Image (cartoon, rainbow, N blue to C red):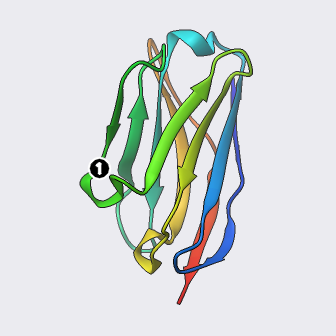
């Protein structure tokens, strides 16, 4: 099983990034997928979730209207489009597969500079 995040980087306040998480080794289309983030010295928090079919999504209040989670089951990939980025969005972002077992990626750093 592998979850490989990409797309992180350094961006200025108000900018955008698109994170990707490529999955392999399990039946991607049967798993809900989530994005979490962990800022320095803080716990890992849920950011957004999407159901296995993509028909349902959930966002934490702090990112509603700015972030969009989506998935492409044909490509075994989940995305997180992040717009209007703020310094408080700085964190390592992780994807997580939620199903009969849970799997985590290794994370990708997002830094928003002011």
In the figure, is residue 107 to the left or right of 64? right
Residue depicted at 74% across the width and 21% down the height: 75
* Residue situated in front as seen by the camera: 66 or 76: 66
Residue 35 picture location, percent across and down: 48, 43
Res 66 quadrant in image: bottom left
Residue 78 picture location, percent across and down: 60, 33
The image shows residue 43, relative to residue 13, as above or below, that is above
In the figure, is residue 75 to the left or right of 90? right
The image shows residue 80, relative to residue 63, as above or below, that is above
Residue depicted at 41% across the width and 18% down the height: 55
Q: Which residue is label 1 attached to?
A: 60
- Number of callouts in the render? 1
Q: Give the structural element (helix, strand or loop) at label 1.
A: loop
* Residue situated in front as seen by the camera: 90 or 39: 90
Residue 100 picture location, percent across and down: 44, 11
Residue 62 picture location, percent across and down: 29, 60
Residue depicted at 49% across the width and 39% down the height: 69
The image shows residue 49, relative to residue 37, as above or below, that is above
Quadrant of the snapshot with the N terminus: top right
How crowded pointer 1 is (Cα within 10 Å; few <14, some 14-19, many 20+) is rated as few
Residue depicted at 68% across the width and 60% down the height: 8
């Amino acid at each position: 099983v592998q979850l490989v995040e990409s797309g992180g980087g350094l961006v200025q306040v108000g900018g955008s990034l698109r994170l990707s998480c490529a999955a392999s080794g399990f039946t991607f289309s049967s798993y809900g997928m989530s994005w979490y983030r962990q800022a320095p010295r803080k716990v890992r928090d849920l950011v957004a979730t999407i159901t296995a079919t993509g028909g349902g999504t959930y966002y934490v209040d702090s990112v509603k209207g700015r972030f969009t989670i989506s998935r492409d089951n044909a490509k075994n990939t989940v995305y997180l489009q992040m717009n209007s980025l703020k310094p408080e969005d700085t964190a390592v972002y992780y994807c997580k597969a939620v199903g009969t077992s849970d799997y985590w990626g290794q994370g990708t750093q997002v830094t928003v500079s002011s």
